[in-house]
Amino acid sequence: MEQKSDVAGYFEPGGKNATLIYILYLANIIVPFTAIVGVIFAYLNRGQSSSWVDSHYTYQIRTFWIGLLFGIISALLTVILIGFLLILLVLVWMIVRCIKGMQLAGRNEAVPNPETWLF
């Protein structure tokens, strides 16, 4: 029974759920569409937990949409070859944001500026 409650904690609003969303975003590099599941979790759980966790949900939602926007722009620019470099930069940007977020969530700390476009 104890193990079941541990797993359930990842699906309820809180620090474990925020960490799961970061993992889903990182898994999206290998397994497509897991980021969509992550952003759905973030939208569903935002406003249902403490303020420090809500800062992570806001950060995650923005990470998804900004990454998608620049990912599409980069894909379109592959026609003139610069897009390949831009795709790599978007990938690095997303990895850094996820690692930073996971570190903060692991320490139960809020994201200092969840509205930022950078890191």
Image: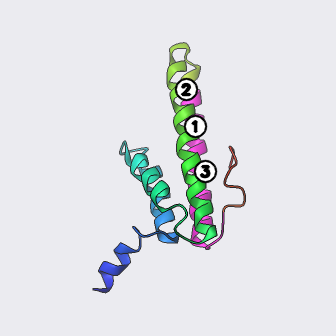
Q: In the image, residue 100 lies at what x, y percent?
A: 62, 58
Badge 1 crowding class, 10 Å Cα cut-off, few under 14, some 14 to 19, many 20 or more, is some
- Look at the picture and state if 81 lies above or below 70: above
Q: Residue at x 60, y 53 (%)?
A: 59
Q: In the image, residue 44 lies at what x, y percent?
A: 45, 58
Report the side of 110 relative to 4 (left or right): right
Among the 4 quarters of the image, the one containing residue 110: bottom right
From the image, tell me which residue sits under label 1: 90
How far is mark 2 from mark 1, CA to CA? 8 Å
Rendered image: mark on residue 96: 3
From the image, tell me which residue sits under label 2: 74
- Counting residues from the N terminus, which is met first, the one under dot 3 or under dot 1? 1
Q: In the image, residue 53 lies at what x, y percent?
A: 58, 67
- Look at the picture and state if 92 lies above or below 37: above
Among the 4 quarters of the image, the one containing residue 7: bottom left
Q: Residue at x 67, y 61 (%)?
A: 111
Badge 3 crowding class, 10 Å Cα cut-off, few under 14, some 14 to 19, many 20 or more, is some
Q: Is residue 57 magenta?
A: no
Name the residue type under label 1: Val
- Counting residues from the N terminus, which is met first, the one under dot 2 or under dot 1? 2
Rendered image: mark on residue 110: none
Q: Residue at x 63, y 68 (%)?
A: 52
Closer to viewer: mark 2 or mark 3: 2
Question: Number of labelled discs?
Answer: 3
Q: Which residues are magenta?
A: 84-110
- Counting residues from the N terminus, which is met first, the one under dot 2 or under dot 3? 2
Return the residue found at the far top: 80
Name the residue type under label 3: Val
- Evaluate if marks 2 and 1 touch, with contact meaning CB atoms under 8 Å apart: yes
How far is mark 3 from mark 1, CA to CA? 10 Å
Way the structure is coloured? rainbow
